[in-house]
Amino acid sequence: MHTNRQRGFTLIELVVVIIILGILAVVAAPKFINLKSDALIANLNGLQGALKSANTLVYSKAVLTGQEKLEPGSVAVNGTPISTTVGYITSSPANVAAAIDGSFEVMTGAQDEITADWGLFNDPGKTMHIYPKGYGNTGNSSLLYNVDSTNTTEPTFYSITSSGC
């Protein structure tokens, strides 16, 4: 007597498994892979690094010209005057845009729509927020920059908010 044993899966079983895996991938993958958020946070970190580097350059020029203790002061970077506070870039949109190479737009209100890569908004006082395109004041995605001349150990302050990325 000859018995015919089935070895392996039938074509229908394989197709069903592939369909189930496809459905799981479509439903579950976006919850685990948030590439847009990761990219935006990386851009904010990169912008913070660029601002810190620009501040190092500006502070070095301020020291060379004896302006590291002045409030206000001014140095020229590539022929462009940049206002300083105790040697660091004064936190105003015009100064940051002049010190860092990038696509910036000065915001007149915190709810302005940003058409450039970055929106620069100056809060009253010495605090400035930098928002990525598509995220305004309500987006919870920004870089805060501040210079405090009364802080003698670390006058510059940087803070990334990424809860809304």
Image: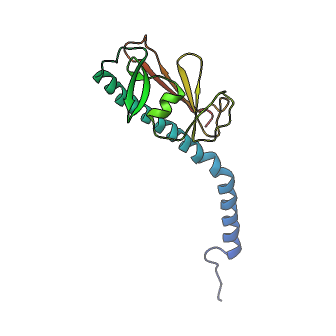
In the picture, the quarter occupied by the C terminus is top right
Q: Is residue 128 left or right of residue 60?
A: right
Name the residue: 64% across, 36% down: 135
Q: Residue furthest top?
A: 150
Looking at the image, is 47 positioned above or below residue 121? below
Q: Is residue 95 left or right of residue 1?
A: left
Which of the two residues, 52 or 15, is positioned nearer the viewer here? 52
Q: Residue at x 66, y 66 (%)?
A: 18
Give whichever of 107, 28 is nearer the camera: 107
Q: Is residue 87 left or right of residue 33?
A: left
Q: Report the residue that reaches farthest toward the front.
A: 79
Residue 97 visible (yes or no): yes
Percent from the top left, x then y, of residue 131? 59, 33
Q: Residue furthest left?
A: 64
Q: Quadrant of the N terminus?
A: bottom right
Q: Pick the residue in front: 131 or 100.
A: 100
